[in-house]
Image (cartoon, helix red, strand yellow):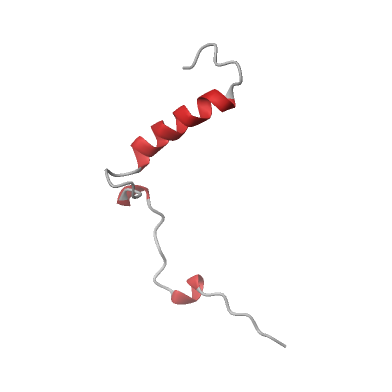
Amino acid sequence: MIENGEAGARVAGPVVRKVMDAWLLDASGHLQPQFAVPVSSDKRANTLTVNAS
């Protein structure tokens, strides 16, 4: 808890960012595997096709 922070988010934002980084990232700064979004093996789900007419 941040007391007497006056500007609220301006003061708390950087603190929350450090907490979230410590929780989600490994030592090298990459997202830990258990928090990563699973990638579909269906390549069509990852490709955007545009028909140029």
In this view, the residue in front, 50 or 45, is: 50
In the rendered view, tell whether residue 51 sits above or below residue 13.
below
In the rendered image, the quadrant that contains the C terminus is bottom right
Quadrant of the image occupied by residue 10: top right
8 on left or right of 25: right
Residue sitting farthest toward the bottom: 53
Total number of numbered discs in the rendering: 0
Q: Residue at x 29, y 44 (%)?
A: 26
Q: Position of residue 3 (x, y in %)?
A: 51, 12
In the rendered view, tell whether residue 13 sits above or below residue 31.
above
Q: Residue at x 49, y 76 (%)?
A: 44
In this view, the residue in front, 20 or 43, is: 20
Quadrant of the image occupied by residue 38: bottom left
Residue sitting farthest toward the left: 27
In the rendered view, tell whether residue 29 sits above or below residue 18.
below
Q: Position of residue 17 (x, y in %)?
A: 45, 34
In this view, the residue in front, 42 or 23, is: 23
Q: Residue at x 34, y 43 (%)?
A: 25
Residue sitting farthest toward the top: 4
Q: Position of residue 27 (x, y in %)?
A: 27, 43
Q: Position of residue 45 (x, y in %)?
A: 50, 71
